[in-house]
């Protein structure tokens, strides 16, 4: 079980560049969260799998939506993905976390890993959307204030569930503004991978 395995799974099922970038964004936030929240109950699974906490949490972020492009309906996602992962022998710590990130599955979020995935998923997408409307299309132009301002605009990125962002931070036990700033910083670290380092504007 390696990060490369996760990337190969993602690219096997997901051709959309935007969905791949979303996966990379959530991976970056999850890796950052592993340093902040790992160590509580249910976080000993990484060593059992021969992984660091950062790799385990990153892999969960990378593959959480791997089935979404092929199976986007509420009836199929993430259920189909869960079946595929189990058939391929992926560990329960990963399959359970992925099932728990969707409110409607009924799978509770009990561990820091599971809570972090829920808290990062919608927020990573929203921060990306904010970056894309900046003049330079760069994450360097995004701050907590601009994200909070756009959250109040219901017409902006309307598919992003604001309640999930708010509730996700609360379940992690962190202040919302703090969590937004934390995730912005994590995404700035992979801005080039996400195409949000300003280069798209410079070459246009």
Image (cartoon, rainbow, N blue to C red):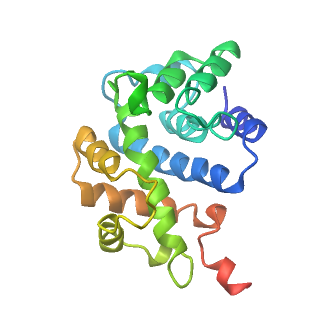
Q: Is residue 193 left or right of residue 33?
A: right
40 to 177, vertically: above or below: above
Q: Is residue 81 left or right of residue 8?
A: left
The N terminus appears in which quarter of the rendering? top right
Expressed as whole percent of the image width and height from the top left, the position of residue 152 reads 29, 66
Residue at point 49%, 45% (across, down) = 31
Q: Is residue 32 visible?
A: no
Expressed as whole percent of the image width and height from the top left, the position of residue 175 reads 21, 53
Residue situated in front as seen by the camera: 107 or 24: 107
Residue at point 28%, 46% (across, down) = 169
Q: Is residue 107 left or right of residue 65?
A: left
Question: Toward which corner of the image does residue 83 lie, by quadrant?
Answer: top right
Residue situated in front as seen by the camera: 163 or 119: 163
Q: Is residue 113 visible?
A: yes
Residue situated in front as seen by the camera: 15 or 183: 15
Expressed as whole percent of the image width and height from the top left, the position of residue 77 reads 57, 30
Residue at point 37%, 44% (across, down) = 119
119 to 193, vertically: above or below: above
Expressed as whole percent of the image width and height from the top left, the position of residue 121 reads 46, 46
Q: How many marks?
A: 0
The C terminus appears in which quarter of the rendering? bottom right
Question: Toward which corner of the image does residue 117 lie, by quadrant?
Answer: top left
């Amino acid at each position: 079980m390696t990060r490369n395995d996760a990337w190969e799974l993602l690219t096997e099922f997901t051709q959309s560049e935007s969905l791949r970038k979303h996966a990379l964004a959530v991976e970056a936030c999850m890796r950052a969260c592993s340093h902040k929240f790992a160590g509580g109950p249910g976080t000993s699974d990484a060593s059992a799998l021969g992984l660091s906490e950062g790799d385990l949490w990153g892999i969960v972020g990378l593959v959480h939506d791997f089935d979404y492009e092929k199976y986007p309906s509420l009836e199929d996602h993430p259920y189909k993905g869960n079946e595929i992962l189990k058939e391929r022998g992926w560990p329960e710590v990963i399959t359970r976390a992925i099932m728990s990130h969707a409110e409607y599955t009924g799978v509770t979020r009990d561990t820091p890993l599971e809570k972090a995935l829920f808290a990062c998923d919608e927020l990573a997408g929203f921060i990306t959307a904010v970056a894309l409307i900046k003049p330079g299309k760069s994450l360097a132009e995004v701050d907590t204030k601009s994200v909070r301002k756009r959250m109040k605009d219901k017409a902006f990125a309307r598919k992003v569930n604001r309640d999930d962002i708010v509730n996700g931070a609360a379940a992690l036990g962190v202040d919302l503004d703090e969590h937004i700033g934390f995730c912005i910083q994590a995404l700035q670290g992979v801005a080039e991978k996400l195409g949000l380092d300003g280069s798209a504007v410079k070459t246009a």
